[in-house]
Amino acid sequence: QLHVVESGGGSVQAGGSLTLSCVASGDTWFNSICMGWFRQAAGKEREGVAGIDSDGTPSYADSVKGRFTISTGNAKNTLHLNMTNLEPEDTAIYYCAADQPCFLAPLATSDIAGFDYRGQGTQVTVSS
């Protein structure tokens, strides 16, 4: 069992930046865990944003490539999402998700919303 908690989020103007963070606690298996972020905007389907596979390789949705950077902290169960040049279309609830055992390499961002464990979500609002 994993417990996932996000932090960060908030409101910014277009072109601004935000950083989201996430910690997965519990019985973590560092050699076989995948973590990532997905988002859901009002009235829209869930969208995988970025993730890190079991080998530590990042993957990104086309919509955020070049603007978002995903990274792990000193511990592999800590995840950060640095979001720059934010657009109003990035407005959504962002969820951190984790899956283990996970041997997906490479990881498709479409897999992330289906991970077994997720946090409560954090709101990101970008105004024009």
Image: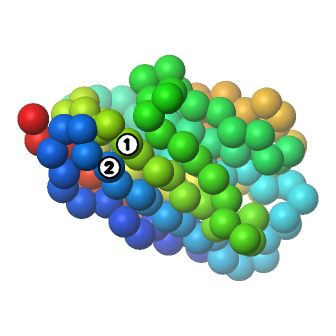
Q: Residue furthest left?
A: 128
Q: Which residue is mark 2?
A: 17
Residue at (50% x, 52% y) in the render: 81
Q: Which mark is residue 13?
A: none
Which quadrant is the C terminus positioned in?
Answer: top left
Could one spot residue 38 in this view of the protein? yes
Which residue is painted at 78% across and 56% down in the image? 33
* Residue visible at 57% across and 54% down in the picture: 97
- Nearest the viewer among 111 and 20 is 20
Q: Quadrant of the N terminus?
A: bottom right
Give the mark count: 2
The answer for how far apart the CA atoms under marks 2 and 1 are is: 4 Å
Q: Which residue is mark 1?
A: 84
On screen, 37 above or below 122? above
Residue 67 pos. (x, y %):
44, 34
Image position, residue 112 (x, y; %): 59, 40
At horizontal 74% and vertical 71% (from top left) the residue drawn is: 75
Tell me the kind of residue under disc 1.
Thr
* Rendered location of residue 18, percent (x, y): 34, 54
Mark 2: amino acid: Ser
Farthest top residue in view: 62
Q: In this rendering, is residue 122 above or below 4? A: above
SS for tag 1?
loop
- Mark 2 and 1 residues: CB-CB less than 8 Å, in contact? yes
